[in-house]
């Protein structure tokens, strides 16, 4: 999918940054509650994040990807063969995120990386609300790792995608009923973890 990108330095740095994010004390506390049982890789492509990150931390990972040929490779190809044989791969769903409805309370983490720009603001809010229902109660997290626009939101007519500002993203999270619990930046990309719902028992100093 990425034309050799997986073999360059950038994805190794990307994975290292993502592992550090999941290892942050605030995030670890919630994931420990969820027992690191089930992840979902949204907009998964060929499964790079599943292979190099999620399958090494969580017991099982589902993948959601609209391109059927990528999913066929996930289910039958060599790239994820080791993970399949180890029972680390769960459901492989061929659909866009607009159609994805996570099973209620299923996921320790719902991982979104470089895939949300193709959703309109309204679709994204609806999607986040469904994700909110899909995480383990009092233990799951929703992670968004996306490029940010500076100044104002940018729409790319060539590939019909949005690059949003941090202000816009935070407004959309708020509309969906999510709270930011940790933010980290990696080489110009801001990296967010959100969790939802009742925060009255969550330490206030953990919410930024």
Image (spheres, grey):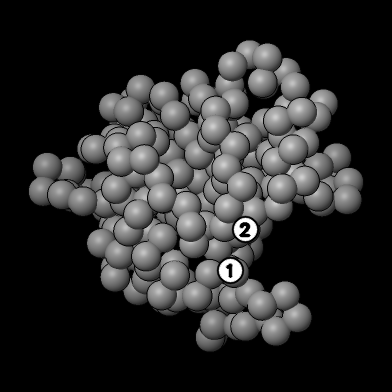
Is 80 or 55 nearer to us in this picture? 80
In the displayed orientation, state which residue is furthest to the left. Answer: 200
Q: Quadrant of residue 155?
A: bottom right
Q: As displayed, is residue 34 above or below residue 109?
A: above
Residue 176 visible to the viewer? yes
Residue 27 visible to the viewer? no
User: Which residue appears at 63% of the width and 74% of the height?
Assistant: 161
Quadrant of the rendering where the C terminus is positioned: bottom left
Q: Quadrant of residue 25?
A: top left
Q: Is residue 10 left or right of residue 59?
A: right
Q: Quadrant of residue 81?
A: top right
How many circles with numbers are drawn on the protein? 2
Residue 167, label in figure: none
Q: As displayed, is residue 29 above or below residue 126?
A: above
User: Which residue appears at 68% of the width and 81% of the height?
Assistant: 156
User: Which residue appears at 55% of the width and 33% of the height?
Assistant: 91
Reading the image, the residue beneath label 1 is: 117
User: Residue 142's x, y, as percent?
Assistant: 41, 48
Q: Secondary structure at mark 2?
A: loop
CA separation in Å, label 1 and label 2: 7 Å
User: Residue 111's x, y, as percent?
Assistant: 51, 45
How packed mark 2 is, by other alpha carbons closer than 10 Å (few <14, some 14-19, many 20 or more), is some
Is 112 or 99 nearer to us in this picture? 99
In the displayed orientation, state which residue is furthest to the top. Answer: 86
Reading the image, the residue beneath label 2 is: 114
User: Residue 150's x, y, as percent?
Assistant: 57, 79
User: Which residue appears at 58% of the width and 68% of the height?
Assistant: 117
Q: Secondary structure at mark 1?
A: helix
User: Residue 159's x, y, as percent?
Assistant: 72, 75
Q: Is residue 173 left or right of residue 56?
A: left
How packed mark 1 is, by other alpha carbons closer than 10 Å (few <14, some 14-19, many 20 or more), is many
Q: Are marks 1 and 2 in contact (CB under 8 Å)?
A: yes
């Amino acid at each position: 999918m990425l034309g050799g990108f997986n073999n360059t330095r950038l994805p190794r740095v990307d994975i290292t940054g993502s592992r550090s994010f999941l290892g942050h004390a605030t995030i670890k506390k919630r994931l420990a509650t969820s027992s690191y049982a089930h992840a979902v890789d949204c907009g998964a492509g060929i499964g790079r994040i599943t292979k190099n990150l999620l399958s090494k931390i969580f017991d099982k990972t589902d993948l959601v990807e609209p391109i059927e040929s990528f999913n066929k490779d996930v289910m039958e190809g060599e790239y994820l063969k080791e993970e399949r044989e180890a029972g680390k791969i769960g459901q492989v769903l061929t659909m866009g995120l607009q159609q994805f409805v996570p099973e209620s309370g299923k996921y320790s983490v719902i991982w979104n990386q470089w895939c949300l720009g193709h959703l309109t603001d309204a679709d994204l809010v609806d999607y986040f609300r469904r994700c909110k229902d899909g995480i383990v109660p009092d233990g799951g997290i929703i992670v968004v790792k996306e490029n940010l626009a500076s100044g104002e939101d940018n729409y790319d007519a060539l590939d019909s995608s949005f690059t949003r500002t941090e202000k816009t993203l935070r407004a959309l999270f708020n509309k969906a009923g999510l709270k930011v619990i940790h933010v980290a930046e990696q080489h110009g990309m801001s990296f967010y973890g959100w969790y939802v719902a009742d925060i009255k028992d969550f330490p206030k100093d953990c919410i930024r």
